[in-house]
Image: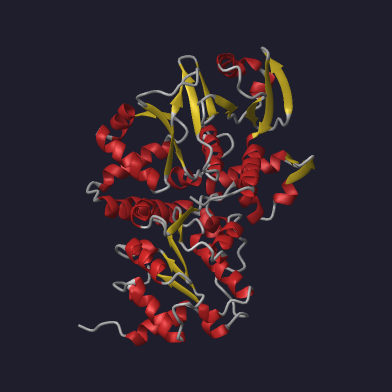
Amino acid sequence: MLEISEKDIVKRLNFDNPWWETGVSGKIAFESNPRRKYFESFQKAITDMTVRRAIVLMGPRRIGKTVMVYHSIRALLDSDVSPHAILYISLETPIYTGLSLEAILGFFQELFQHKRDSNLYVFFDEIQYLKNWEVHLKSLVDSYPDYRFVATGSAAAALRLKSNESGAGRFSNYVLPPLTFAEYLMFIGKDDELIELQVNEGKRNYFAKDITELNKEFINYLNYGGYPEAVFSETIRKDPGQYIKSDIIDKVLLRDLPSLYGISDIQELNRLFTTLAYNTGNEVSLDGLSKSSGVAKNTIKRYLEYLEAAFLIKRVERIDHNARRFERAMCFKVYLTNPSMRAALFGQLESESEAIGNLIETAIFSQWQHNQQVELYYARWKTGEIDIVHLALEDQKPIWAVEVKWSDLPYRNHDNLDNCVVFVEKNPNISQPILITSRTISDKKIVYRKVQFNFKPASLYAYTLGANILRNVNWLE
């Protein structure tokens, strides 16, 4: 049997690293694409050689990890780093199958006579395709402290679990979430057209210049805007089911999770995820999920952990109207981490669709994913519910609350605010005004039954969340 020759491997290395031949002035893949708001923090971590750790970039499929790596390479070249000091490898490429990271690095070192104390930048893309990758990467970090190693991967569960166990003190883990609504508007070049920023005494306030047009783009964002690739491709936008479902959802459900956890009944996992996706934003229970999906409750518990580790869903715990958590959390809410997944599975929604309210709530929670420090809950009791509640870490008392609506009715008919009044009466120290999202009503303050309320369009609130959170993002774990 023929083995892959060293000559063929070196030939592929040259193909994957065109800057070795073209130099600084050569074109780099994706360099014309806009950069994620995370890029500046990512690049700063790469160039800070005082921290001797590998950087492990995790996140859902097709969210822009590889693009950000190429943007990093472009930035390194522009900052006078030698093209011969940068190595990019996609471990998904068949020719590298079976090769260790040490062996690949060895080819690179020999090609340019690099020394152990050289300042090199080495990017391993899709590292989960290498068995025991974390052991090899840790060894490289220890052996070459002057090299900067960067790895990306989509199999979130394996990356997070294994890096914590085997790479303690050697890896800095980052999570790249889906696009925020603010990033989406920036990508399509409409943020300045639709959003007005006013800064007063250091406080940033955002206003909608055209709420009708902003809502239109918000609906587009719900349907496909969480994925950078879909934003730029009309073909994908026309048929998100074919591209998003097959390339993102199916590969995780049918390949990644089964291979990681030895799942034999793939259809069972698929039925559960389909049920969760259709009910995104709704309260569910283990009993209800078991009946609707036909999956045993103990199996559901494991599958929920797997799906959450793979960045497909986010579970939110329930509290009561006294803001007390339940000892046995039999009921909880499940949100898709990216609202666009629902459209890919069940078809795109319009502004009047029956499920639009739940999808908007999903999108609001999606914006909050970009802040790893804020733990959110929802309150529910026999006669009422509050969609979002934030509890203080020190005493677990509610700090603020948000009720998510896609309607202006609560502003005109205050009876719709009774649930919020009950919650405030039970928790009088909560910050006021209570925020109610609307469809078009903006910054209209009212007092109802001694409780202050503020109204803001859901689309504008989603934009504000993303814009403010990403201004202060610190996504190092």
Relative image position of residue 442 (x, y in whole percent): 72, 32
Q: Where is residue 115 in the image (x, y as percent from the top left)?
A: 45, 81
Based on the displayed image, in which of its 4 quarters is residue 10 positioned? bottom left
Quadrant in which the N terminus appears: bottom left
- Name the one closer to the observer, 444 or 199: 199
Q: Which of 39 and 65 is in front in this view?
A: 39
Q: Is residue 3 visible?
A: yes
Give the number of callouts.
0
Question: Residue at the top extreme?
Answer: 449
In this rendering, is residue 192 above or below 436?
A: below
**Display colour scheme:** secondary structure
**Quarter assignment of residue 19:** bottom right
Image quadrant where residue 269 sits: top left
Q: Which residue lies furthest to the left in this view?
A: 1
Query: Does residue 12 appear anywhere in the picture?
Result: no
Q: In this view, does 408 lie above or below 21?
A: above
Residue located at (27% from left, 42% from top) = 268
- Residue 415 versus residue 300: which sits nearer the camera? 300
Q: Position of residue 372 (x, y in %)?
A: 52, 43
> Is 458 situated above or below 420?
below
Asked whether, in this view, residue 474 is left or right of residue 15, the answer is: right
Q: Where is residue 391 in the image (x, y as percent from the top left)?
A: 53, 28
